[in-house]
Image: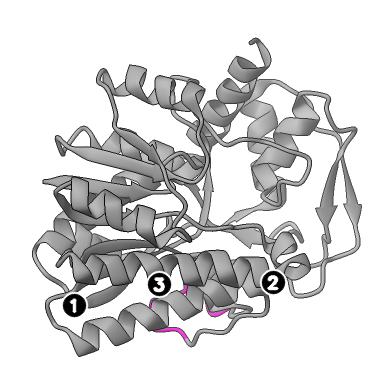
Amino acid sequence: MTILVTGGLGFIGSHTVVSVLKQYDDILIIDRHSNPSLLSKLEILCNRKIPFKQVDLLDKMSVQNVFQTHNISMVIHFAALKSLSQSYKFPLEYYTNNITGTLNLLEVMQMSNVKKLVFSSSAIVYGNNSNVPLTENEPLSVNNPYAQTKLMVEQMLTDISISDPEWSILALRYFNPTGAHSSGLIGEKITKDSSNLMPHIMRVAAREQDCLSIFGDNYDTHDGTCIRDYIHIMDLAEGHVKALQYIEQGCGFDVINLGTGQGVSVLDLVHTFMEITKVDIPYIIVESRQGDIAKSYACIDKAKERLGWTAKFTLEDMCRDAWNWKVSEASK
């Protein structure tokens, strides 16, 4: 029986493939982008050939062909556009890709009687809720098209599970993934348009960017900067292995946070990065961004209870592995 990983060549998907193949024998990656170099690195890390098909979920016939030619038992669904800023500029593209693509996948799964799914959701569905630590029962709200697509898919999955109890679906709400595989072979692709904090820190460290802009220092936190829950990408990947084991038992529809449960400020992260790498990060304080909340971090009790999972890597590990990946890429 094969585990299908959609978007398996993305940042989270590729690291998850490495972890999944330690526990399961058969996996198939589909992604609308082909990346032979990354696939080769995954095969080195996993010491085996990894089946891959270039498939866009918007092409329903191609998705059907995947299920007709492979004995799929479970699906991990990562495939989606994910830039918050880009979603404001291209909302129709985000709704088409993230919603229609998921609908196609779900319809084919139902036709194929494959009803076990792990969905890549996000803590962004909590909106501006600052009632930390955030539990899975918090009210949900969204204020951008990307977040709306995550919330809409969660609602679809809820409705499916109500209509048909054979479905076993787990939505994982990620907090702030960062870091890289300790080998330095795979990590997060960094561009000037990256919206996460760590890529910008590394661009400054690599002298590709003059300085880091920190948005505001007057929040109600210990150093005035925003606090977030940063989680190592390999902890997140291991969470998906636990999620597969969970849905194998049958769970209807459930949602679980994946975070460390610990809040880290922007300046905490910057100073830890400098301490671990011995690289200076010049920074300036600029005006706060509208909509940014002071604190956001996870309650992880449910992950402990239902998945038997907790994060193991430290903030120091995240900084070390992320920089190791950046240095490794720069040397090529």
Q: Mark 3 points at which residue?
A: 103
Q: Is residue 59 above or below residue 12?
A: below
Per the model, the C-alpha gap separating discs 1 and 3 is: 18 Å
Can I make out residue 247 in this image?
Answer: yes
Q: What element carries label 1?
A: loop
User: For residue 91, which numbered disc appears in the image?
Assistant: 2
Q: Which colour scheme is used?
A: one colour
Per the model, the C-alpha gap separating discs 1 and 2 is: 31 Å
Segment tinted magenta in the rendering: 130-138
Badge 3 vs badge 2, beta-carbon distance below 8 Å: no
Callout 1, which amino acid? Gly
Q: Is mark 3 on a helix, strand or loop?
A: helix
Callout 2, which amino acid? Pro
For marks 3 and 2, give the one nearer the viewer: 3
Quadrant of the frame with the C terminus: top right
Residue 69 in the image: x percent, y percent?
20, 46
**Which quadrant of the figure has residue 119?**
bottom left
For marks 1 and 2, give the one nearer the viewer: 2
Q: How crowded is mark 3: few (under 14 residues within 10 Å), some or many (20 or more)?
A: some
Residue 120 lies left or right of residue 91; in this view the side is left
Q: Residues within 10 Å of mark 1 (few under 14, many from 20)?
A: many
Callout 3, which amino acid? Leu
Q: Mark 1 points at which residue?
A: 252
Residue 202 in the image: x percent, y percent?
71, 32
Q: In this view, does 114 lie above or below 293?
A: above
Residue 307 in the image: x percent, y percent?
21, 59
